[in-house]
């Protein structure tokens, strides 16, 4: 079947996948955002729907004062004998003890268990269930010499108890940061797939195999089996961190992540989930037969693509699963149903705390985002583009005696610039709009859509990961309130821009140029 990459666009990195009969389940990293670990479902591999999240309670996910791009790293999802397991790392727990833990559930549509913690430092853990019932943990660690590699030991996945000695089984092919391991068994051989080269522009996927799970492991002669590190003309860069799945028809596929730069080595909407077929050569898995990953995959007929539009009228008591909060939110500050009400607090978007904010991931470079709001109190509220507490653009609204004052705050690293304030009188509500383009965000406000005023602009490049201090996340469109503010939002919409619609139409006729 033809399909379009990314299969899950926007900030959805480090994908892990498993199959149960005809159904597929996928999870992603979530870092400092709550709830944690987005959970997806598909019955085709090509079209995905978000079911919700794995970590939905603060007791499962402690994110207090979590720095940007700490929190949840690289989860793995597996199913065994009707029970689902998710193992991950909460980097925010490093100063307090072991950060690695497992949760489980017998009902993929229900709640997940409280975490069981594992006496093992490092990141990117995975689980492997062998045919004889033995269960193994593999993850990134540092051996007694300080060298980074992949450590293996047996484990009880329901208690976290370690059941064997620990052994370092592979150090990769020589690329930096060997991490993100996953284990598989095929034709009585154990396969170890890892990421190397760092999650930036040298990213790659490498494989080793052994007849014994403890090793020694033989490196694949075709390594790396996936990388765009020498393909600077591709629309996709930073390609890596893969997980494999076998279909019921015994075909193999890989999910992995990549970025789409807005300019040379600058990306701002995050690492996105991709898909490619796996072929086997001389007993080794090759992702897309080592060919570059393209937008349209499969047959020449191009039919399926992700729907980037999103509308929420806040007319139920349930939050749509697209919404995320910063760190552990105080949900008493939010009231949903007949619109959305957000109350401000002493925290702002500049703080490493849970400011009054909820956001939806930006999934394409060219999109329009819009809301209608009213405001009470002496604080400010509005709409924003948020990447980290040090990199965000905020359209601030304050109540005046005759209407509203509107200004654009641009926070970039240690610099803050506030625009001239515009006054919009004789109205009890405002329309706020963000027009996102490849290189610029434009911000508008007005009493209705026909009378929008340009408030200011902000460069997408200053929201790029490469401009920041090593972040792993992507941009959100968000709603916020600060100080003594009580904001009422009637709706929130993300719509494809004219440019995005034209690009999508063109994609149906041709491939992106490389």
Image: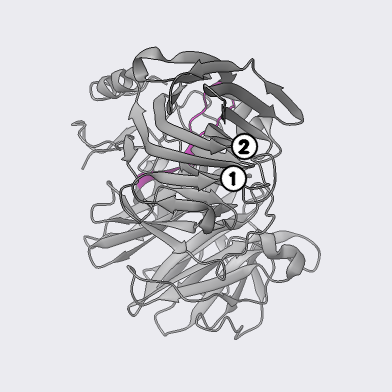
Dot 1, how many residues are within 10 Å of its Cα: few (below 14), some (14-19), or many (20+)? many
Element at label 2: loop
Magenta span covers which residues?
A: 258-276
The answer to whether the residues at label 2 and label 1 have Cβ atoms under 8 Å apart is: yes
Q: Is residue 234 left or right of residue 69?
A: left
Residue in the picture at 61% in, 32% down: 392
Q: Is residue 131 left or right of residue 344?
A: left
126 in relation to 482, above or below: below
Element at label 1: loop
Q: Was residue 108 drawn as part of the magenta stretch in this picture?
A: no
Magenta stretch, main secondary structure class: loop
- Of the image marks 2 and 1, the number of the one nearer the N terminus: 1
Q: Is residue 91 left or right of residue 220?
A: right
Q: Was residue 271 drawn as part of the magenta stretch in this picture?
A: yes
State the image coordinates of residue 95 (x, y, percent, origin top left).
76, 64
| On-image quarter of the N terminus | top left
Residue that carries the numbered disc 1 in the rendered image: 344
419 in relation to 189, above or below: above
Q: Is residue 377 left or right of residue 54?
A: right
Tell which of 245 and 377 is nearer to you.
377
Residue in the picture at 79% in, 62% down: 146
Residue in the picture at 66% in, 74% down: 167
Residue that carries the numbered disc 2 in the rendered image: 379
């Amino acid at each position: 079947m033809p399909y379009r990459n990314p299969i899950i666009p926007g900030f959805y990195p480090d994908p892990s996948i498993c199959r149960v009969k005809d159904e597929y389940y996928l999870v992603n990293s979530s870092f400092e955002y709550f709830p944690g670990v987005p959970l997806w479902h598909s019955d085709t591999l090509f079209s995905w729907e978000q079911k919700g999240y794995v970590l939905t309670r603060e007791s499962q996910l402690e994110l207090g004062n979590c720095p940007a791009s700490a929190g949840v790293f690289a989860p793995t999802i597996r199913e065994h004998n009707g029970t689902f397991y998710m193992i991950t790392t909460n980097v925010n727990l490093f100063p307090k003890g072991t950060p690695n833990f497992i949760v489980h559930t017998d009902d993929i549509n229900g709640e997940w268990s409280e975490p069981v913690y594992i006496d093992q430092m490092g990141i990117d853990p995975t689980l492997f269930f062998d045919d004889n019932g033995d269960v193994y943990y593999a993850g990134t660690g540092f051996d007694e010499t300080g060298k980074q590699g992949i450590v293996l030991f047996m484990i009880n996945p329901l208690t976290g108890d370690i059941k064997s000695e620990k052994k370092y089984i592979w150090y990769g092919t020589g690329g930096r940061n060997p991490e993100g391991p996953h284990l598989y068994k095929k034709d009585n051989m154990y396969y170890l797939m890892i990421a190397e080269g760092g999650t930036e522009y040298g990213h790659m996927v490498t494989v080793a195999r052994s007849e014994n799970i403890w090793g020694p492991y033989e490196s694949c002669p075709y390594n790396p089996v996936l990388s765009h590190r020498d393909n600077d003309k591709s629309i996709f860069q930073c390609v890596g961190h893969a997980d494999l799945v076998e279909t019921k028809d015994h075909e193999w596929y890989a999910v992995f992540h990549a970025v789409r730069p807005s300019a040379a080595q600058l990306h701002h909407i995050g690492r996105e989930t991709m898909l490619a077929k796996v072929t086997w050569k001389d007993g080794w898995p090759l992702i897309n037969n080592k060919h570059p990953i393209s937008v349209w995959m499969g047959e020449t007929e191009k039919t399926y693509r992700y729907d980037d539009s999103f509308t929420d009228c806040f007319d139920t008591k349930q939050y749509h699963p697209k919404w995320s909060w910063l760190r552990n939110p105080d949900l008493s500050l939010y009231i949903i149903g007949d619109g959305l009400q957000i109350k401000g607090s002493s925290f702002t978007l500049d703080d490493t705390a849970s400011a009054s904010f909820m956001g939806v991931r930006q999934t394409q470079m060219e999109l329009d985002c819009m809301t209608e709001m009213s405001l009470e109190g002496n604080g400010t509220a509005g709409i924003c583009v948020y990447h980290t507490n040090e990199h965000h653009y905020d359209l601030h609204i304050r109540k005046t005696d005759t209407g509203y004052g509107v200004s654009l705050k641009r926070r970039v690293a240690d610099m803050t610039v506030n625009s001239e304030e515009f006054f919009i009188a004789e109205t009890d509500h405002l329309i706020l709009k963000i027009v996102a383009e490849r290189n610029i965000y434009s911000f508008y406000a007005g009493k209705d859509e026909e009378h929008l005023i340009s408030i200011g602009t902000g460069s997408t490049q200053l929201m790029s990961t490469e401009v920041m201090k090593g972040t792993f996340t992507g941009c959100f469109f968000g709603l916020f309130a600060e100080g003594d503010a009580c904001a009422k939002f009637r709706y929130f919409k993300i719509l494809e821009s004219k440019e995005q619609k034209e690009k999508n139409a063109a994609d149906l006729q041709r491939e992106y140029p490389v």
